[in-house]
């Protein structure tokens, strides 16, 4: 029997009762046959459906929705090769810091100037930060993902070796969003990890932070850039963005950064600022600007193409960017793109 078939009797009982009759679960797929995510063949899928029925979603709708889902091996493969885990800074930076992406970022702000101004006024998040997030995530809505969200989340929920529980929650949230917003779940596309729309919100973030920013009665992050702009700003505000504060500061440091020192000083760890200026200075890492010794920062080290290490000190707002994607490479790419967009937009005004 498969892993998903070995659940406790009480867990399966809820699922069986919701269907009204015992289900014939599939045996281990034969060689060359993909695993199933359909509820009539997958105990986890059936149990999830039972839970959602108890929460008020129609059983027939759920059965049809989950019945459309397909196991997708490429999704599991993609999870192992995320760029943030395999690229060095100069390689990662080159993907996003292009002249075209900068120019289109300035154009995106100009095209939606009223929405950006209102978002900054309400949430305190600068236009260039919101634009850079959308620019990094989907190239301003051009590339929202080729994977069916339903397939991605069902595959990850029932077959990811370590994060199945997390993605099970995302699948449940996605199904609820699709039902409540009256959209066909099998027609929505996104990333291999189930992120959706202009800002690539995962479903639980969609539920928690998406806003109807144009007041048309619908939160639409798939096709409405105005809702996306307001939603990104709301996300940052809710995660502690501080209007007017710096994101990072330049620093100097040793030519080589040992693994021991990286670990000792928590370099590149995307946790809230916790290392003091004095601690860093004691090990040869010093801010270019003068700060109090007890000021807390996030020590960051970036490797360039020539092997040189660039040092930076992240503040609270840098940490907030990492709440969107838990990678220091991602946060710095967003930051540098936002700086370039802001400079060009100002120049063009």
Image: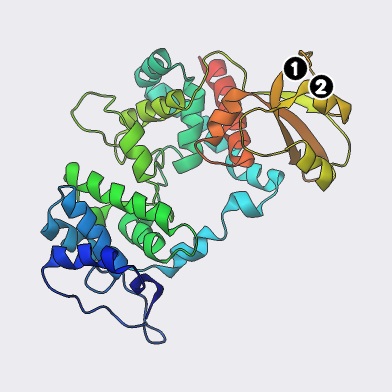
Residue at the spot 51% in from the left edge and 22% down from the top edge: 241
Q: Are marks 2 and 1 in contact (CB under 8 Å)?
A: yes
Q: At 56% across and 41% down in the image, what residue appears?
A: 326
- Residue 42 vertical placement versus 238 (above, below): below
Q: Is residue 29 above or below residue 261?
A: below
Residue 294: mark in rendering? 1
Q: Secondary structure at mark 2?
A: helix
Q: Position of residue 32 (x, y in %)?
A: 40, 84
Question: Quarter of the image containing the N terminus?
Answer: bottom left
Q: Is residue 42 above or below residue 166?
A: below
Q: Answer with the quarter of the image where residue 341 lies.
A: top right
Q: Residues within 10 Å of mark 2 (few under 14, many from 20)?
A: some
Q: Secondary structure at mark 1?
A: loop
Query: What percent of the width, then of the height, locates residue 144?
Result: 39, 47
Q: Is residue 197 visible?
A: no
Read off the residue under disc 2. 278
């Amino acid at each position: 029997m498969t892993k998903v078939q070995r659940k406790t009797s009480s867990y399966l009982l809820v699922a069986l009762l919701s269907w009204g009759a015992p289900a014939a679960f599939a045996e281990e797929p034969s060689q060359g046959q993909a695993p199933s995510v359909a509820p009539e063949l997958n105990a986890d899928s059936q149990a999830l459906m039972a839970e959602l029925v108890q929460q008020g979603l129609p059983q027939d709708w759920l059965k049809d929705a989950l019945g459309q889902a397909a196991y997708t091996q490429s999704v599991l493969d993609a999870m192992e090769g995320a760029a943030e885990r395999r690229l060095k800074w100069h390689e990662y930076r080159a993907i996003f810091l292009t002249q075209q992406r900068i120019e289109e970022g300035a154009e995106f702000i100009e095209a939606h100037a009223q929405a950006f101004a209102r978002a900054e006024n309400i949430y305190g998040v600068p236009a260039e930060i919101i634009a850079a997030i959308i620019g990094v995530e989907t190239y301003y809505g051009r590339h929202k993902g080729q994977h069916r969200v339903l397939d991605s989340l069902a595959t990850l929920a029932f077959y990811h070796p370590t994060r199945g529980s997390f993605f099970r929650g995302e699948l449940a949230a996605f199904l609820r969003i699709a039902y409540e917003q009256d959209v066909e779940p099998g027609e929505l596309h996104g990333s291999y990890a189930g992120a959706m729309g202009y800002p690539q919100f995962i479903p639980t973030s969609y539920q928690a932070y998406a806003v109807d920013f144009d007041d048309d009665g619908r939160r639409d992050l798939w096709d409405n850039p105005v809702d996306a702009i307001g939603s990104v700003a709301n996300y940052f505000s809710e995660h502690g963005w501080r209007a007017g504060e710096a994101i990072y500061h330049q620093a100097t440091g040793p030519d080589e950064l040992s693994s021991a020192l990286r670990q000792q000083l928590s370099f590149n760890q995307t946790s809230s600022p916790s290392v003091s200026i004095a601690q860093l200075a004691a090990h040869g890492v010093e801010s270019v600007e003068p700060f109090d010794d007890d000021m807390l920062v996030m020590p960051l080290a970036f490797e360039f193409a020539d092997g040189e290490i660039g040092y930076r000190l992240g503040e609270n707002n840098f940490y907030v960017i990492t709440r969107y994607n838990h990678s220091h490479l991602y946060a710095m790419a967003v930051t540098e793109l936002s700086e370039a967009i802001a400079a060009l937009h100002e120049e063009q005004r």
